[in-house]
Image (tube, coloured by chain):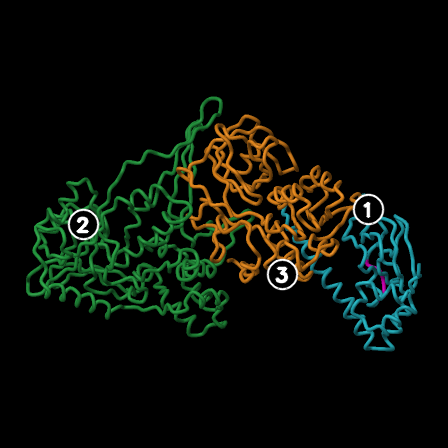
Chain colours: A cyan, B green, C orange
Amino acid sequence: MTIETIGQILAKHPFFAEFQPEHVELVAGCARNVRFNPGEYLTREGGPADRFFLIRHGMVSLEVATPGRAPIVVTTLREGEIVGASWLAPPYRSMFDARAVELTRAISIDAECLRKKCEKDHYFGYEMMQSVLRVLVKRLQATRMQILDVYGE
Amino acid sequence: MGGNWKSATIKPEGLHSLIGKLRDEAYRVVGPTMRDDAIVYDDIAGLDDLPKGWTDDQEAGRYALARRSDDAYFGYNVGPHSWKQFLFPPVETMWHAQRDEDGAMTCSAPSRPKEKFAFVGVRACEIHAIAIQDRVFREGPFADNAYASRRQDAFIIAVNCGQAGATCFCSSMGTGPRADGGFDLALTELLEGGDHRFLVEIGSEAGAAIMEAVPHAPASSEQVEAAAAIVEETANRMGRSLETDGLKELLQGNLDHPRWNDVADRCLTCGNCTMVCPTCFCTTVEDHSDLENRTAERVRKWDSCFTLDFSYIHGGSVRTTTHSRYRQWMTHKLANWIDQFGTSGCVGCGRCITWCPTGIDLTEEAAAIRAAPSKADAQ
Amino acid sequence: MPAPVQSSDPFVPEIYRVGAVRRELADVVTIEIEPESGGRPDFLPGQFNMLYAFGIGEAAISISDETKHGGGFVHTIREVGAVSRALAAMEVGASLGLRGPFGTAWPVAEAEGSDVVVVAGGLGLAPLRPAIEALLARRERYGQLAILVGCRTPEAILYRHELEQWRQRLDIDIEVTVDHASTDWHGNVGVVPSLIRRVAFDPDDTLAYVCGPEVMMRFTASALHEAGVATDKVYLSMERNMKCAVGLCGHCQFGPSFVCKDGPVMRFERISPIFAMREI
């Protein structure tokens, strides 16, 4: 059995699928493997957005806490998706509680390290910006559809 | 007299006698008559009921009766009525249901008295309109039995048009002004030289049979030629025209055309066009029950795609705007109908133009889209 | 497509009786009905019946199953109007009218040898259920089989029992997602099109059956397109106002199609030019 390098794992993740190999290598320098047990949080609402996660396995729910009742789940994310897009835009604060619903394995990328690389190489930064934006636009559309309450009750 | 001849002439008295014979044979004879300042279709007993010496003066949004300088019986175009109101009545009971004390239900079609219609004065466009409704009501996978039965028994006396109205465009639609089939008898009214006659063409065995009993004379070749000349002259005097070449693709490819908004500013969504149209077939149903909830019935009524309710689904209507409702009507009539039934739904009778309170003219609307299509014709 | 059978009068209902009633959700009831005399006509998955409540009116309701011994129909009804409320309030033994079955079917036989992705939104699972049963009855004839279900909340999941049974099989992918939930729900939260990339199928050789609210179908059709499924392999079930169900009343027109006879199940390719257009 061979052990994959972080770079190889990144390259296989859908988020980096279209990236140039040298750019993936740039990211690898900021990345490490992490795991979360069920109930552990990847991010906390209002906390520093200092890490950007790529889910490799498991399920993460984005939640908003509400007093007097169980937290509201905004969406659930699974293998192949990203968590923590707030690393990219000031004020670099997380917008949700991201909680592992089941055992979750992910790649954690150091946000400050990543921001520096984006700043240094704008081609890379643009590629990163575009990839994050693509995901966010999809999520925005999905959220709008959720708001529509199409099943009308 | 032999039964092989194809044409003859009859005098007005012969027509009177023909109407009488049809009545003797238990036909309900319906023809043109004057009522409420219009020429409408209603029961007739003879020549006296016909609009002798009258004509109709029509334009977009305008209809008025006027005296003719002669005694023509069929010297008008078409009025607000069409024959669909007899073959496809505006209100029809579909079935009755009963419920006993235990709530057990039974349901049965009403016994409809058999009604044999004889239509006098059916124009070529109207014969085509009947054929179009035939395709809808009796030639599809499901048939309307009541319509089919009335249609089966109907006796049709066509009249070739001796004049074209200002809103007529049957020549464009290929539906007139000459009746080329679909009749039992076809008349052309001849007034030349004070010799008032009708040239009669035989269209069916039933037509030939009844003519046996009507005093007639053989038609001379001059009379046949005179009749042909009259219809040809009518064809040349159409008040409107509609370019039908590629019309289906043009309309289906221009559902976003700004002209729909333009026409929506003029359309009152009153539905007049759909009521006077001889092919419009949309209906709604009403369910009634008595106060004790023991008997119930379902009644079908003419409906119009111009009403808001027409497209209602849970949550609201699909077509809330005027432009979408006008677009639905016109694209159905002139384009989608071809996909659905193989022919246009329009016969060029012009009623929708005449009876529109704001004078909307579908030939003008189609021409406006053709003049500036927003898209290349979808092929 | 089956040749429609002309009964003596296509407008006159046959009499059926309610054999069983089951409440599915707060506003959804399933009724089992049997013909008062004779057998029930055959039906294909995706077809619908016109059900008549005495003195109130008719509603088009999809067929969601046959009764246990095949003698009757099963209909799942949501209480949204006078007719559906009256139908949903019927008790065992009550008498109702039925015309049908009408309309087109999910292409179950055409899918043999291919993968099938079934996407249901809300009550859209009801007309898909006979198709799912037909696919499962001959499971060996199909490739990958995925059933994706979306609904508003965990409480609004239709046919929970059936979903659980299907999920026990190892040869289907079943994913359920809800639009709104709290952390008491441990499943997916999000819209149903987002489930498409969660399941395995060969986009070049897949048929997709989609049924739900029109907005949901629009999003799902575009997600399937993004996943590489061609528009001629995607089928939707449409809803429009319906009075006669036999193509004679004009109400259900959707462009050149009559939803009652050219639908409700329609190939997306055929309707895609007008599907996103408003007020057609």
Q: Is residue B32 visible?
A: no
Q: Residue at x 60, y 38 (%)?
A: C65
Subunit of label 3: C
Q: What is the distance, in whole Å, between disc 2 and disc 3 at their CAs?
A: 58 Å
**Badge 2 vs badge 3, beta-carbon distance below 8 Å:** no
Kindly report which numbered mark, 1 or 2, lies closer to the viewer in this rendering: 2
Circles 1 and 2 on the same chain: no
Kindly report which numbered mark, 1 or 3, lies closer to the viewer in this rendering: 3
Give residue A67's mark.
1
Residue at the spot of label 3: C230
What crowding class fits label 1: few (fewer than 14 Cα within 10 Å), some (14-19), or many (20 or more)?
few
Q: What is the distance, in whole Å, between disc 1 and disc 3 at their CAs?
A: 47 Å
Q: Is residue B115 visible?
A: yes
Residue at the spot of label 2: B207
Q: Position of residue B255 (x, y in %)?
A: 49, 65
**Badge 1 vs badge 2, beta-carbon distance below 8 Å:** no
**Front in this rendered view, residue A106 or C138:** C138
Q: Position of residue C139 (x, y in %)?
A: 68, 44
Q: Residue furthest top?
A: B101
Q: What is the distance, in whole Å, between disc 1 and disc 2 at their CAs?
A: 88 Å
Q: Main secondary structure of the magenta part?
A: loop
| Apparent side of residue C31 relative to residue B143 in the rendered image (left or right) | right
Subunit of label 1: A
Q: Residue at x 10, y 54 (%)?
A: B12
Q: Secondary structure at mark 2?
A: helix
Highlighted magenta segment, given as a residue range: A91-95
**Front in this rendered view, residue C158 or B327:** C158
Looking at the rendering, which quadrant does residue B97 occupy? top left
Q: Position of residue C142 (x, y in %)?
A: 67, 49
Q: Residue at x 79, y 70 (%)?
A: A129
Amino acid carrying mark 2 in the image: Gly
